Image (tube, rainbow, N blue to C red):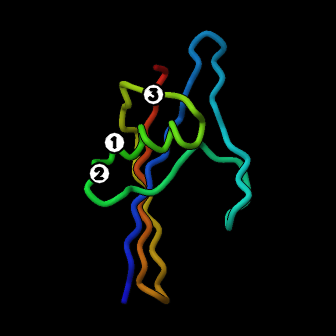
């Protein structure tokens, strides 16, 4: 049976320095990424993004602005992976 996974990712920007927070990933996908994590049952996308930013970085974020959606489809399994992207400077 095909699966659908939902992930929220957030770019946290410091407007004073014009720097963004990134993570050096070490799990199944190696590379640099914005902090991200899965959406739990009963959670809105924004609630998931706020929770994941706290879990991943220790920061409490607010005023998230949507800035894109990425969709991956695996044609062998039928699995779909949706990433909802946000940005904030708060």
Q: Quadrant of residue 34?
A: top right
Spatial CA distance of label 2 from label 1 is: 6 Å
Instruction: Determine the secondary structure under disc 2.
Output: loop
**Marks 2,1: beta carbons within 8 A:** yes
Which residue is more in the foreground, 77 or 1? 1
How crowded is the residue under tag 1: few (<14 C-alpha within 10 Å), some, or many (20+)? few
Q: Residue at x 51, y 38 (%)?
A: 53
> Relative to residue 36, is residue 3 drawn left or right?
left
Q: Secondary structure at mark 3?
A: loop
Q: Mark 2 sits on what residue?
A: 43
**x then y, percent, for residue 82:** 41, 61
Q: Badge 1 is on which residue?
A: 47
Q: In the image, residue 42 lies at what x, y percent?
A: 25, 56
Q: Residue at x 61, y 9 (%)?
A: 16
In front here: 90 or 52? Answer: 52
Numbered tag placed on residue 36 in the rendering: none
Q: Residues within 10 Å of mark 2 (few under 14, many from 20)?
A: few
Q: Marks 1/3: CA distance? A: 10 Å
Upstream in the sequence, badge 1 or badge 3?
Answer: 1
Per the image, the residue denoted by label 3 is 61
Total marks shown come to: 3
Is the residue marked by circle 3 packed among few (<14), some (14-19), or many (20+) residues within 10 Å?
Answer: some
Question: What residue is rendered at 54% in x and 42% in y?
Answer: 55
Of callouts 3 and 2, the N-terminal one: 2
Residue 37 sits above or below residue 12 on the image: below
Q: Is residue 7 above or below residue 47?
A: below
Q: Which residue is situated farthest in the top direction here?
A: 16
Quarter occupied by residue 73: bottom left
At mark 1, the secondary structure is helix
As measured in the structure, the alpha-carbon distance from the residue carrying label 3 to the one carrying label 2 is 16 Å
Give yes or no for contact between labels 1 and 3 (Cβ–Cβ under 8 Å): no
Residue at point 63% right, 28% down? 20
């Amino acid at each position: 049976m095909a699966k659908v996974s939902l992930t929220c990712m957030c770019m946290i920007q410091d407007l004073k320095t014009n720097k963004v927070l990134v993570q050096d990933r070490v799990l199944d996908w190696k590379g640099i990424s914005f902090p991200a994590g899965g959406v739990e049952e009963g959670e809105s996308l924004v609630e998931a993004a706020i929770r994941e930013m706290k879990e991943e970085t220790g920061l409490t974020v607010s005023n998230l602005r949507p800035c894109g959606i990425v969709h991956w489809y695996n044609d062998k399994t039928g699995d779909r992976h949706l990433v909802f992207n946000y940005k904030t400077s708060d």
